[in-house]
Amino acid sequence: MGTYNWRHPQKLALAVAAAVQILGGQAMAEDQKETVELEDYILKESVEDTMGIMPSQPVKSVFGLGKSIAETPRSVSDVSSDLIENYGLRDINDLVRLAPGAYTSSFFGVPGALSLRGDAADNYFRGFKRVENPGNYATPIRAASSVDIVRGPVSPIYGAGKVGGYMNFNPKSSKSGTSKFIEKPTGQFGVTVGSYDQYITTAEGGSPFELGGRQGGVYGFFEQEDSKSYFDNVEPKSTIGQIAFDMDLTDNLRTEFGGQYLKAKRIQNPGWNRVTQDLIDHDTYITGAPSKMSSRGDVLFPDDVRNNISPGVGFPPGSGNSKLDVFCLNYSNCFFDPKDPNAALSNPGTTKLDRNKVFTDKKDKGESKAATAYFDLIWSLDNDMELKNQFFYDSLDHNKYTSYGFTADYDAYTWEDKVSLSFPLQIGEVSTSNVVGVNYRYYSAIDRESYLDEILDRRDLNVGPTPDDSFDIGHTGNVEIAPGMYRRNFNTQSASITKNTGAFMLSDMNWQNWNLLLGYRFDYYDAKAKEKAQATNGDLVGDANGDGRPDKATNHNTTDSFSASLSYKTPWGFIPYFTYAESTALSANQAGGVTASDVSSGNYLQDSKLREYGIKYNSENGNVYAALAYYDQEKTYRDSQNGSTVLVNGKGYEGELRWMLNQNFSMTASATKQKVREKGQPFTVLNTAAVAQAYGLDPSQLYGFRFFDPTGQVLGGEYDRGGVPEWVTSLYGNYTQPTPWGGRVNASLGFTWVDEQWADNQKQIKLPDYTVWNGSVGYSEKSWEALFTVNNLFNEKYFTSANLFDSTLVFPSAPRTYTASFVYKF
């Protein structure tokens, strides 16, 4: 059992008491003036925001309060559905055009979750944390009325979350931004066609209704995609259905409920292997065939690539000794025989590799089914109090196979119930808005993975997959099909249940131009996990006590989180602020579960801290919004491969500008300067070309092997995280013009510039800086609209680092693509 430190609650209690007494005392000490002098008021001209540029609506996804973005003392960006449409945003990776800190490296080519401030971020749905989705399916941003991008740890009101931050998805509903029901039935049908046989159809619409004399509304959204892509074998297909009901039940009771269902097929796209600096700089790819190792069929089996598959041999024990994995202490100290017949490629050479030729296979698969549901009851009580009961459910069924050597089956679901009471409180001149509540979250996850042999450099991408560089799919149970012959096993089969009971409070205190925002959360965790994978020979992977039964672990722990923010609203529209926060996140696997080893050691919880200084500006007429922030945040995590603890520290600056210049012109801009440092010794895969150079060999002489340092000593103890460019900037200009006959023309043009960066934390491969231009032009009338979009306008060639295996993989860019969308509205 973990021990609970009461230090934080005492500090918070003292801070709240002191703040209320000081603010309240000063307010009550002032003499009340009998006369109030009114200042002259000059009406400032406002501009109609036809493209959804300005963050005009209150954002509740940060602190659960109806504060505007300008008044919210955190670095946050809001992206409306109009902005998603007018900028032609395709997936979450395109959000870097608008949001600082949102540059995201490639997670095998599937845009599932953002990286924020150089760290993994969570996906939320209406303020509730979803099932983990690092890269299982593409998050459907086109189904959102808006997405909120919050950088840094979550507010205490929302429980455990990653230090990077989160993206909150707000589904389209029957209520407008002013929380009023739509007045009449509305709907639209759309079709999108584009380069490489892109084809997407959509339908959405809503209607008000009355039931028992009470007003309500319903809104539905449907999207289907059946496309191909520039990259070989990558053909995304998906179907999304979404519905939202809003209804008044009595004069003071209303409900909001609905859900989303997604079914998607999309394979992983690792990009390019055999990475050298010459490949990055000149597209020169080293060709050559791997050694003949396949004994049967069209893939490699465990007995092809491992010796002595017997009890106690290999890692995990019973897996045998790998013929292709090489243990290293550093680049020049590896334990292998350079003359091993499996090391070198045959017929080596070089070629200029076409960028569509990537590490994919027609046999690869990736299938997802995700279901989400919510049900809220909201009571409006006396004295402006509001009581909510919110229920949330989310599930994922995902399986994938990639012939480079990875199979995964994820089956996870979560449900959560939250009860909260919000109420105002006036103490003299101090006005407060407060939220208190409790929640219970249940998370069940089954994570099956087969990844023991991922020898990425064996395949010649210019040739494509062969039996000697493809690996068998993972299987459960006994994998021995004949003496000495095996199918591939799942080397991890983790099943876990985590239960989280929490209580939280938030107080937003205002006195004159000062604002103090305090939040606190207490959590009790109950975690259970089991590891029942079997090694190739049938021995249990997890059997620490040797009793012949799968390892089981149970643990429970208490943690607390808190945040404190102080801001001041100046007469000129500037609002400087400071925020300090400490929070906790689960150390989760790819399915969002926890492992038996982490539960047993108590390392399934990660602590994080944030210090953020910022200033925001909102013009009097609402035509300009600007924000600048400096942050310093840190967390710890446990490396899943070798169990070591790694400290991560991120520091940087973020700037954002949205400006309606006049009735015709507007602009958006964002800039990020960041650096992420790590301290620790995680499991590390080495760049094969760098090993070859250290031994005075040609890379083709070693591309049959994988070189790794399980101790992480090669990193030197402290190092920069790879795949994090120091600078990222975006600038977009927009033009809109009404026509004499009632239509409107919209156009947008801009670029994102990404600084040069090291692809890997070993600083072996440097990716050059690049600039990507994108543009769109559209026309709309009352009953129809059209939009034409060009991505990568000038056909820039660039690379994105890999989220995993960053020393051996890079992701090449797609060329210029075109998209045309047509919508009929009724």
Image: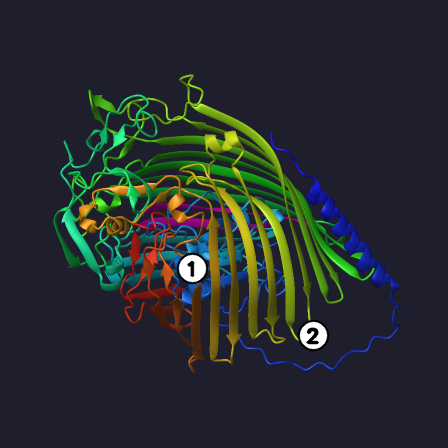
Q: Which mark is residue 571?
A: 2
Residue 387 appears left or right of 685: right
Classify the position of the N terminus by image quarter: top right
- Mark 2 and mark 1 residues within 8 Å of each other at the beta carbon: no
Amino acid carrying label 2: it is Pro
From the viewer's perspective, is residue 578 above or below residue 408?
A: below
* Residue wearing tag 1: 103
Tell me the chief SS of the magenta region: strand
Residue 772 appears left or right of 75: left
Residue 490 appears left or right of 363: right
Classify the position of the C terminus by image quarter: bottom left
Image coordinates of residue 291 in percent, x first then y, are 15, 40
Crowding at mark 1 (Cα within 10 Å: few <14, some 14-19, many 20+) = many
Amino acid carrying label 1: it is Tyr
- The magenta-colored residue range is 237-265
The residue under the point 20% across, 50% down is 697
Q: Which sits earlier in the primary sequence, circle 2 or circle 1?
A: 1
* Quarter of image, res 735: bottom left
From the viewer's perspective, is residue 150 above or below residue 659?
A: above
- Nearest the camera: 600 or 510? 600
